[in-house]
Amino acid sequence: MVSALNGAQALLRTLADAGVRACFTNPGTSEMHFVAALDSEARMRAVLALFEGVASGAADGYARMAGSPAATLLHLGPGLGNGLANLHNARKAHVPVLNIVGDHATTHARYDTPLQSDIETVARNVSRWVRRTQSVQAIGADAAEAIGAAIGPPGQVATLILPADVSWSQGATPAPPPAPPAPRVPDADAIEALARTLAGAKRSALLLGGGALLKPALRAAARAAAACGAQLLCEVFPTRMQRGAGLPAPQRLAYLPELASTQLSGLQHLVLVQAPAPVSFFAYPGRSGELVPAGCAVHELADHSQDATAALEALADALGAPSAAPPTAVAPRVSAPTRGPLSAESVCAIIGAMLPEGAIISDESQTSGVALGPATAGGPPHDLLALTGGAIGQGLPVALGAAVACPDRPVLALEADGSALYTIQSLWTMAREQLDVTVIIFRNDAYAILELELQRVGARGAHSKARAQFDLSRPELDFVALAAGLGVPGRRARTVEELTPALSWALGEPGPHLIEAVVPSVFSPARLRAMPYGLRALSALPRPLAGALRRRLYPG
């Protein structure tokens, strides 16, 4: 007897049975049967995005906070291509994302119509698992395998290509959920050997990433570090880092290699826990891309397929650490400034002083966020989600997805003005879904990091035409008007006196809000030399790091 379900219905039921609860969509004609099938599956929340980069980034943000996969629904190869930047970020974050990419019917492909493309080739840029479903009978099993591939461990992007005729044909059967994943167990002998090495080392560090930045692993890392005198570091752009008063606070590696080299200088042993060995983000003339100091031995305690918490607990036990984590020094909560023109530093201080408990921060503030870490260290417990793959335009969609995953928690999206414009359509979805997201735009009218990089790479002959490529002031951006056009109420702040009540308003009302904070650029070398606030921003960094950056910006 032929099943009464078509391929799209069986696919949705398989996803929902496996615990997939959200699908971020930007559909087209080839996906219409999937869209229709959404009405047959009450467990699946469908969230419309106006751009595929919003859908893919939102799936990433959802997965980071839910710990389970979200799906995207994308239209053919061009739709998948539009989502690639944030799928790249999701791949680097090691989170589970399942793309459902519609395609022409199998009988239609021979016509090479305008939207015909090689979807598999596009998908392989960001996906560890890619499959085209060949028949309606295979759709359930293919979907279950795709879910298992996305979950991992490690979590990854999986792409299932769904031809339109497979979607509309009858006779499909849902498949049971894949077996729960089991992370690999760390090798006991290797951990014992590493403990002996660290016990005799004068200067060592644990570099944490991935799941090692969640509470249980952080506390185990603090036990191990206290037992052997190691420093706690974390990767530059963590997928999800739990922070705030009462939690161990590893120092984030700096983005600039000069600062990161200072942090790592003198180490004898560096232990990687779901983090890569530090390298420079870019090549610079005459400099090595490797940041691990000469003579430092690198050890991998756990990769992304292993249980970071178990590995750190075993290391702490092997070092003879007490069973309880050492007391954490509680950083004082910052005091908000009360008056004066806004700077990036004062905006961060106000955020730190007003941060609500349980907040989720999606941080794409770029150069303006240099003081965010110190400003929020003494705040209430919160989560930080960072720009894992470096492809800008992540912050707003990740905040959107996090808000869908955690509707009972306030979400703050801290955005640089240039980055925000890549996926500004996120605001419309936030308004449509009435998500509790407060967006703070740091408007400095520049791609400020590129002003600094122009100096650092040694590019010669860079004058007015070159510098104009980083200038966002002509015409002047108006994010309050943009937000209003997308259904989100907004305010502009140029002073402390304007920002503090605006943030209170945004945090105190349900639904999305936007605040445009007009600030000078922090990392423009010319402005740093001329403006005292720039030096104050540097003083928020640990002293050796601030000194390294000063020497770089002010040679001689």
Image (cartoon, rainbow, N blue to C red):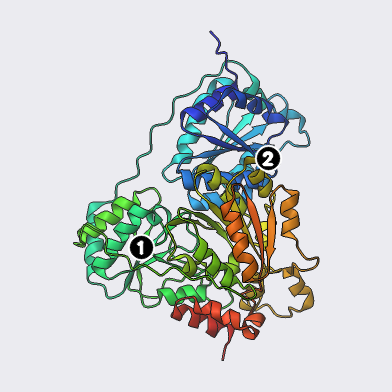
Marker count (numbered): 2
The reply, left or right, for residue 369 in relation to residue 543 is right
The mark nearer the N terminus, 2 or 1, is 2
Residue 554 in the image, given as x and y percentages of width and height: 58, 86
Q: Quadrant of the C terminus?
A: bottom right
- Name the amino acid type tagged 1: Pro
Q: Which residue ends up furthest to the right in the rendered image? A: 475
Residue 130 in the image, given as x and y percentages of width and height: 55, 38
- The answer to whether residue 472 is seen in the rendering is yes
* Label 2 Cα neighbours within 10 Å, binned few <14 / some 14-19 / many ≥20: many
Nearer-the-camera pick, 462 or 535: 535
The reply, left or right, for residue 494 in relation to residue 406 is right
Residue 153, quarter of picture: top left
Residue at 58% in and 36% down: 23
Residue at 70% in and 38% down: 117
Residue tagged 1: 248
* Label 1 Cα neighbours within 10 Å, binned few <14 / some 14-19 / many ≥20: many
Nearer-the-camera pick, 435 or 199: 435
Residue 529, quarter of picture: bottom right
Nearer-the-camera pick, 317 or 191: 317
Q: Which mark is residue 306?
A: none
* In the image, residue 482 above or below residue 262: above
Residue 464 in the image, given as x and y percentages of width and height: 78, 77
* In the image, residue 342 above or below residue 394: below
Residue tagged 2: 77
Residue 123 in the image, given as x and y percentages of width and height: 60, 43
Residues at marks 2 and 1 touching, judged by CB atoms closer than 8 Å: no
Q: CA distance from mark 2 to mark 1?
A: 44 Å
Secondary element at tag 1 = loop
Closer to the observer: label 2 or label 1? 1
* In the image, residue 105 above or below residue 343: above
